[in-house]
Amino acid sequence: MSGGEGAEGPARRILSLWLPALALDRWRLDAPEAGRGLDAGPLVLIADTAHGPRIEAVNGHAAREGVRAGMMLADARTLCPQLATAGFDPAGDGALLQALAIWAQRWGPWSAMDAPDGLLVDVTAVAHLFGGEEALLQDVHARFRARGLAIRSAIAPTAGAAWALAHYGPDRAIVERDIGRALSGLPVAALRLEPATLTVLRRLGLKRIGQVAEIGRDALQRRFRTRKSLAANPLIRLDQLLGHKPEPMLPVIARIAPLAQRRLMEPIRHRELLDQVVGDLAADMARLLESKGLGARRLELALWRVDAEVAVRHLEMAAPSRDPAHICRLFAARLDDVDAGFGIEMLRLRAVWTEPLALEQGDIEAGADRPGTSLATCIDRLSARLGARAISRPVPFASHIPERAQRWHPPLEPEPSSQGLLEFHARPLKMLDKPEHIAVLYATPDGYPQRFRWRGGVHEVVRVEGPERIAPEWWRERGSARLRDYYRIEDGEGRRYWIYRQGILGDGRGGAPDWFLQGLCA
């Protein structure tokens, strides 16, 4: 059993789970029968790099031939010409690990991912529910074995100690107290240090955790005082392993996506009936989202056919919404190419991305059933018809140069943070794509313009406001960049322009100043 209870409650117990063959195990589970036959001989999972395919995972047959992870595929084929290959998918491995982290909460109240191939579970004061920690580990191994996943495990008072035992201890290890003595014989790699730090320790003759713990802290502090990261400082890792320093961990929280489903008594094949069922699902989803105070940003509609084929349609919206009519209008364009086959017997609508959306009192006089005309609704309709890549929107950018003060982003992407944005004077509503050169007549070299020529026409200036001086961005432009003095002017016909003089006479950064027109004022 774990350590007894003290004045502050039960002693902490952390379960570390290591899946040493996660990538290969997932490949075996996902590969079809024909693909699984490849595993009967030497097999490696490869990833493309700038220097060619590199091996990321190796099965037992290939390992016996001398093939190791990290080798280039060309070098490995010289050792094993009959080597079979498959693609390495780190994103798929990460998704499986996240799902396993939620599933592992059967053994403790919270769990955390220990990327790229491990999990941490808090099993404090829960081992007695399984008959003790030994029985708990037996249950862990039995359930992972039933899922076809190889596993190593350990339970210790700290996450660092449990990780070290799971990776470098016996297959199932339990440490209750005196972590330092129990782990003193493990290699220094069990401290979770980066390769460069491990090389330095080995050159100093420190190959075991016990040797690092016995040497004077002052000597190690002087040697590694410039290394601040966790994986580069052996003292920090040792203190975390022994429990002298806390090690924060980010728990994985299961989020259940709102779901609405319809099982049909008779399969449907006609579009009118399909639209009717989608409308019912949208209404159910709206009620479900409203009860949770949420709005959907991304929806997934799955349609099961009688022949077991599944058609999936995705929908993403510019702003959170739970308007059933709006959702139906957007899905209408996505269902035109659905092949019903012998009929659709089940439909499922999931809100895979949601955001908070407060309840609002509708306008009674205007009527709650009036179709929405907001900008987000317009963007959603255009995206559904033209595609998200055909539409873009301007977003502010932290630059005081007018032509750089905004950038174009896809409409469905989250807006970048406004941190660092600057406050400006009022800018023209109409900005030219590129400032256009104009010829200006003025009374003095530094005075405001009196007359200018633009696009073949001559304009007499009757009113002037300015100047507003804008300095160049010295950190991204050459030292010869010149100042800008902006003027708001009005000609004799009442038309208003935004022009600027680039440079000052005698500034030593070129000849006479140039004039440009950049915007049209209201």
Image (spheres, grey):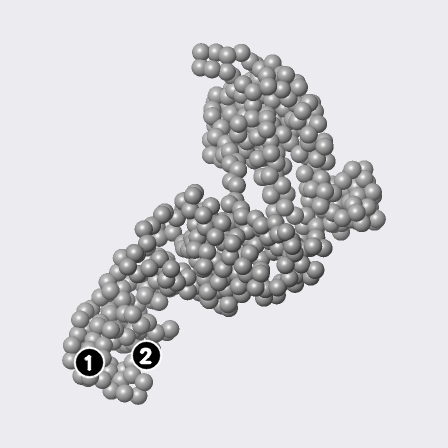
Q: Judge left or right: residue 178 versus residue 420.
A: right
Name the residue at 28% across, 59% down. 365
Q: Is mark 2 on a helix, strand or loop?
A: strand
Front-most of residues 213 and 115: 115
Which quarter of the rendering shows the N terminus?
top right
Q: Which of 513 and 382 is in front in this view?
A: 382
**Res. 509 in view:** yes
Look at 51% across and 25% down and name the residue there. 240
Find residue 437 and name its label: 2
> For this rendering, which residue is in front, 213 or 83?
83
Q: Position of residue 258 (x, y in %)?
A: 51, 45
Residue 511: image location, x then y, percent: 29, 75
Q: Disc 1 or 2, which lies upstream in sequence?
A: 2
On the image, the x and y values in percent for residue 348 come to 58, 50
Check the picture and name the quadrant holding the C terminus. bottom left
Whether residue 13 appears in this view of the structure is no
Q: What is the spatial separation of the Cα atoms under label 1 and label 2, in whole angstroms?
A: 21 Å
* Vertical comparison of 195 with 282: above or below: above
Q: Which of 153 and 293 is in front in this view?
A: 293
Q: Is residue 196 above or below residue 420?
A: above
x then y, percent, for residue 14 = 56, 24
516 left or right of 409? Answer: left
Q: Which mark is residue 494?
A: 1
**For residue 75, which numbered disc appears in the image?**
none
Q: Which amino acid does label 1 sit on?
A: Gly
Kindly indicate the quadrant of the structure image that contains residue 137: top right
Question: Which residue appears at 66% of the width and 34% of the height?
Answer: 19
Amino acid beneath label 2: His
CA neighbours of label 1 inside 10 A, class few (<14), some (14 to 19), many (20+): few
Q: Report crowding for label 2: few under 14, some 14 to 19, many 20 or more residues within 10 A (C-alpha).
A: some
